[in-house]
Image (cartoon, rainbow, N blue to C red):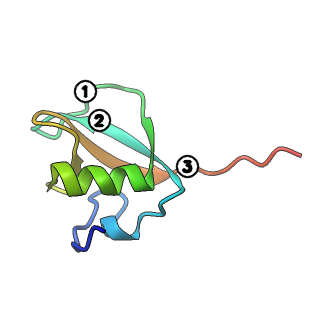
């Protein structure tokens, strides 16, 4: 799939190292790198890899469209319910 060695700015790992089935928290930023919403969004690793392959990568962030980028902040911890 995505063979590039692009490093994610905040998370500090390569895009290809994202876990397909994990959920990641992302900050939504504009072209200038400014956060445009306070809430983090949740998106799976496979979706992030697909976006990077289809839309590209810039300044350590995955492009969503012409004006928005996802800065992958962290992997969401799973909450186990007993």
In this view, 75 is above or below 18: above
Q: Say which residue label 3 marks.
A: 76
82 vs 35, left or right, is right
Q: Label 2: state its secondary structure.
A: strand
Q: Label 1: state its secondary structure.
A: loop
- The quarter of the picture where the N terminus appears is bottom left
What's the mark number on residue 28? 2
80 vs 28, left or right, is right
In-front residue for pair 49/40: 49
Query: Residue 39, image x and y in percent?
Result: 42, 28
Q: Earlier in the sequence, mark 2 or mark 1?
A: 2
Dot 1 crowding, Cα within 10 Å, few <14, some 14–19, many 20+: few
Dot 3 crowding, Cα within 10 Å, few <14, some 14–19, many 20+: some
| Residue at left offset 35%, top offset 51% | 48
Q: Say which residue label 1 marks.
A: 36
- Report how many numbered discs are placed on residues in the image: 3
In-front residue for pair 57/51: 51
Dot 2 crowding, Cα within 10 Å, few <14, some 14–19, many 20+: many
Q: Label 3: state its secondary structure.
A: loop
Q: Earlier in the sequence, mark 2 or mark 3?
A: 2
In this view, 36 is above or below 43: above
| Residue at left offset 19%, top offset 35% | 68
In this view, 5 is above or below 57: below
32 vs 9, left or right, is left
27 vs 6, left or right, is right
Q: CA distance from mark 3 to mark 1?
A: 21 Å
In the rendered structure, are the residues bearing label 2 and label 1 in contact, judged by CB atoms less than 8 Å apart?
yes
Query: Residue 38, image x and y in percent?
Result: 37, 26
Q: CA distance from mark 2 to mark 3?
A: 16 Å
Q: CA distance from mark 2 to mark 1?
A: 6 Å
């Amino acid at each position: 799939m995505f063979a590039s060695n692009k490093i994610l700015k905040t998370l500090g790992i390569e895009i290809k190292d994202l876990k397909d089935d994990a959920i990641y928290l992302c900050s939504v930023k504009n072209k200038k790198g400014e956060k445009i919403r306070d809430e983090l969004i949740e998106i799976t690793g496979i979706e992030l890899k697909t976006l990077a392959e289809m839309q590209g990568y810039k300044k350590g962030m995955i492009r969503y469209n012409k004006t928005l980028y996802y800065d992958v902040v962290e992997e969401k911890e799973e909450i186990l319910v007993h």
